[in-house]
Amino acid sequence: MNEIARVFAAGGGGLVLLGLSGLHVYWVCGGRWGADAAVPTAGTRPLFRPSRAGTSVVGVLLAGAGAVVLAEVSPWAGEFTKWGTRALGAVFALRALGEFKWVGFFKRVRGTKFAKLDTWLYSPLCAVMAAACLYLGWR
């Protein structure tokens, strides 16, 4: 049962990360679907405008994170993947908690499109990803 749970956590987490990487590649290539709700806004004004280079870097980092998570249940698993999944778990936990104004479970700004999706999708997904990564990193 323990190995089935590890494969489920790694497979699910890895697929989520690779899918998000693909979404960032889509945006870099000019796609618009979902882009209007990807950045926190003050009213209708985005707090920042992601550059193509920045979006590319995020896409590459997400793909790398997906590879580390998937590798944790592969023959190549080792100290790097163990510590990598632990670090990812910490990053996702911090993202889920947020910075107490714009993102995370404890944000104060709540009425925007981003904030609503952050409450119901982004932050819960980060919490689940944190749990999966920490489970993998300590098993």
Image (cartoon, helix red, strand yellow):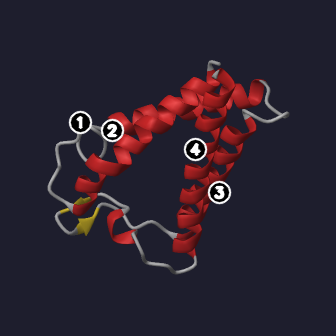
Q: CA distance from mark 4 to mark 3?
A: 19 Å
Q: What amino acid does circle 2 point to?
A: Gly
N-term-proximal mark, 3 vs 2: 3
Residue identifier under label 4: 12
N-term-proximal mark, 4 vs 3: 4
Task: Tell me the quadrant of the picture where the N terminus can be found.
Answer: top right
- Mark 2 Cα-neighbour bin, 10 Å: few <14, some 14–19, many ≥20: some
Furthest-top residue in view?
A: 138
Write down the quadrant of residue 73 in the picture.
Answer: top right
Label for residue 94? none
Decide: marks 4, 3 in contact (CB < 8 A)?
Answer: no
Residue identifier under label 2: 98
Q: CA distance from mark 3 to mark 1?
A: 28 Å
Residue identifier under label 1: 106
Furthest-bottom residue in view?
A: 30
Q: CA distance from mark 3 to mark 2?
A: 22 Å
Q: CA distance from mark 4 to mark 2?
A: 23 Å
